[in-house]
Amino acid sequence: MNDLTHLDEHGQARMVDVGGKAETVRKAVASGRIAMSAIALAAIRDGSGPKGDVLGAARIAGIMAAKKTADLIPLCHPLALDSVIVDFTFEEAAISATVEVALTGRTGVEMEAMTACCVALLTIYDMAKALDKSMMIGDVRLLEKTGGKSGKWRRDGGLTPRLDGLG
């Protein structure tokens, strides 16, 4: 018996059949950051960049990306999302993005949260690259997921995964 869920008995890729799974409320939270110069950071903060409202565009891009994840990641299920929340925080030399995606369904939304985070950060880069081409995107990671058979999972301190049991 093959323990890899995305491979059939012949080793061929397949989409996992989630038809028999119970619908549960599922949520995933992902984060990442984009480091940049003080000039780019100030322009984004005060809205003076050459392309306008950088974070507004990045927020919309993140939401759109979450909705299109199944078109981008092979074997992901297309999902009817209940909500996508994209938030930004200014740091000393960076902007961090945090994305929360939720639905009631048969499969999780971890890929949707991480895809949304990546695309939001890439949009910040695109909107501000005239000010700083050396911006660096990194630290994209899953922070938390809830729901489904595996229950709740949380990344402690951003470093060590820990299973919290079911729930």
Image (cartoon, rainbow, N blue to C red):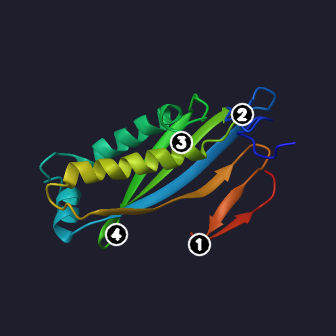
Q: Nearer the viewer, residue 118 or 15?
A: 15
| Residue type at the position of mark 1 | Gly
Label 2 vs 3, first from the N-terminus: 2
The residue that label 3 is drawn on is 112
Label 1 vs 2, first from the N-terminus: 2
**Is 98 on the left or on the right of 79, as rendered?**
left
- Circles 1 and 2 in contact, beta carbons < 8 Å: no
The residue that label 4 is drawn on is 91
Q: Nearer the viewer, mark 4 or mark 3?
A: 3
Query: How far, Cα to Cα, is label 4 from label 2?
Result: 40 Å
Query: How far, Cα to Cα, is label 1 from label 2?
Result: 32 Å
Q: Nearer the viewer, mark 1 or mark 2?
A: 2
Q: Position of residue 160 (x, y in %)?
A: 65, 71
Label 4 vs 2, first from the N-terminus: 2
Q: Quadrant of the N terminus?
A: top right
Query: How far, Cα to Cα, is label 2 from label 3?
Result: 17 Å
Element under disc 3: helix
The residue that label 2 is drawn on is 16
Q: Nearer the viewer, residue 43 or 117?
A: 117
Structural crowding at the residue carrying mark 3, measured as other residues with C-alpha within 10 Å and reported as few (<14), some (14–19) or many (≥20): many
The residue that label 1 is drawn on is 157
Element under disc 4: loop
Label at residue 46: none
Element under disc 1: loop
| Residue type at the position of mark 3 | Glu
Element under disc 2: loop
- Circles 4 and 3 in contact, beta carbons < 8 Å: no
